[in-house]
Image: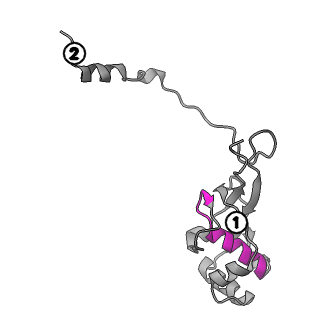
Amino acid sequence: MIAPAIDLERLANMGGPMSRTRTDRISVSVLGNDKGSVKCPRVLRIGLDFGRRSPLTCVRDVLKQCGFADEQEARAAVALPAEACICRPDPAPTPVPFATLAPEECLFQVLVLGLCTPWLYDPGRPVLWTRTSLTRRLELFDGRGFYA
């Protein structure tokens, strides 16, 4: 007796037995590569250490010190990267202590962090400041050379 067509389809697409499974670790990345045909150079490494202070309170203080009413006003005045970037969590973070930076340097960093998700810096999105976004330690990469 011949099995119905649906059963033959399932038999033909069974996959390998469990003994043939394998796991490979990826040990090479194109991120950070600025030579060769595929380029994805690092543009920026960013991360702040707020110590015991609330990141949101620190950001409000910096806005006042720099003379801005809100993040939109600050964003219009600060030169930020104009192109979208690929982000990844920094594998060797060295966050800069917030208290050691000049207010203008802090403002630049918190604006960039507010425009980042864990995977993308998007200069077209609204600035979103949360405890999570402000405490990220990221590397930003220029992905325009990825599709070489």
Q: Residue at x 77, y 76 (%)?
A: 105
**Residue with the most extreme left position:** 1
Residue 3: image tag: 2
Q: Is residue 24 above or below residue 82?
A: above
Q: Nearer the viewer, mark 1 or mark 2?
A: 2
How far, Cα to Cα, is label 1 from label 2?
62 Å
Dominant SS of magenta comes to helix
Check residue 113 for magenta coloring: yes
Amino acid type at mark 2: Ala
Q: Residue at x 58, y 73 (%)?
A: 126
Check residue 31 for magenta coloring: no
Q: Quadrant of residue 54?
A: bottom right
* Among the two numbered marks 1 and 2 on one chain, the one whose residue lies closer to the N terminus: 2
In the structure shown, which secondary structural element does the residue marked by tag 2 occupy?
Answer: loop
Q: Is residue 36 above or below residue 81?
A: above
Which residues are the magenta region? Answer: 103-120
Q: Which residue is mark 1?
A: 47
Residue 42: percent from left, percent from top: 76, 54
Q: Nearer the viewer, residue 143 or 65?
A: 143
Residue 97: percent from left, percent from top: 74, 72
